[in-house]
Amino acid sequence: MPLVNFCKKCKREVPAGETCPFCRGKLVKTNEHIAFWMERVPARDWFAWNQALRVALPALLFAALAITLLEERLSGGEAVQTLFLRGFFWVLMEALGGMLLLMLGIFLLQGKEQIRFVLDKEGAHAFVHLQKPSRRRLYARFISFKAAEALWEKKPEGPSPGTLIRRADIRWADVKKVRFWKENRQLLFFNPGWWQVLVIACPPASYDDAEAYVRRKLEKSRKVKVLPKKQAASPEKSK
């Protein structure tokens, strides 16, 4: 069961309950949370590509539109036609291919990472760790050693087998939409409803508990769109 508590006296995560099994200290109910670890390879992760493409593709389209409008304004509509007849479209495709190759190279340099996902009373969190991070792997994530050290000084409570290099958080009050992707055991959080903020990937044994926890937090709110809706038990099953 991924539901755990944090013992202030032992400074460790322990199974949920009334008392700590190690020091017998009293545990606070509000500190109960769900936590688990997942390993990720960005080069093989769709959501890593998705996050990068959501910035890169609009930038490429904006550049293409700006060039087209500038050509039309300076030389007229015929110049725009000439621009595309001379291969401007294929130049854009080559730029897209080069951009994808560059992204692949960056992701390969990043290597593996370990992510600790937490669902607690405040919201959903992801803490990205690296084992013995090198400058190359940090720079490939556009992070400096100084920034990583500053983040490490504010590390959250709980186990940290590696170096914390990034964190992402979303409060329950800020969630506008949540989608449960049971087939891939992933929870997708959005704010606003069209912008994906955080993806939580769950181990097989933890997904059902994680989904149930998030539903309890968000399903009663009229401000949050929950997809898919929880299906009511059929009359036959309830008998």
Image (cartoon, helix red, strand yellow):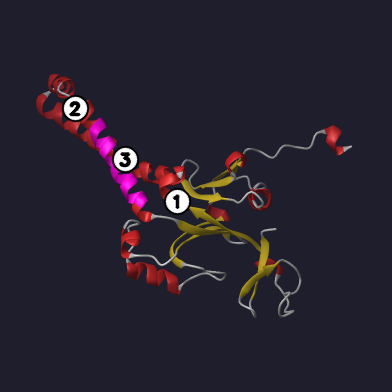
Q: CA distance from mark 2 to mark 3?
A: 19 Å
- Spot occupied by residue 198 in the image (x, y as percentages of width and height): 50, 50
**Res. 100 mark:** 3
Say which quadrant the C terminus sits in. Answer: top right
Q: Amino acid at mark 2?
A: Phe
Q: Amino acid at mark 3?
A: Leu
Q: CA distance from mark 2 to mark 1?
A: 35 Å
**Res. 88 mark:** 2
Please rate how many residues cluster around mark 3, counting C-alpha atoms within 10 Å: few if below 14, some from 14 to 19, many from 20: some
Is residue 146 shown left or right of residue 186?
left
Q: Amino acid at mark 1?
A: Val
Lower sequence index among marks 1 and 3: 1
Check disc 1 and report the residue beneath it: 41
Total numbered labels placed on residues in the image: 3
In this view, the residue farthest toward the right is: 239
The part of the chain drawn in magenta is: 93-108
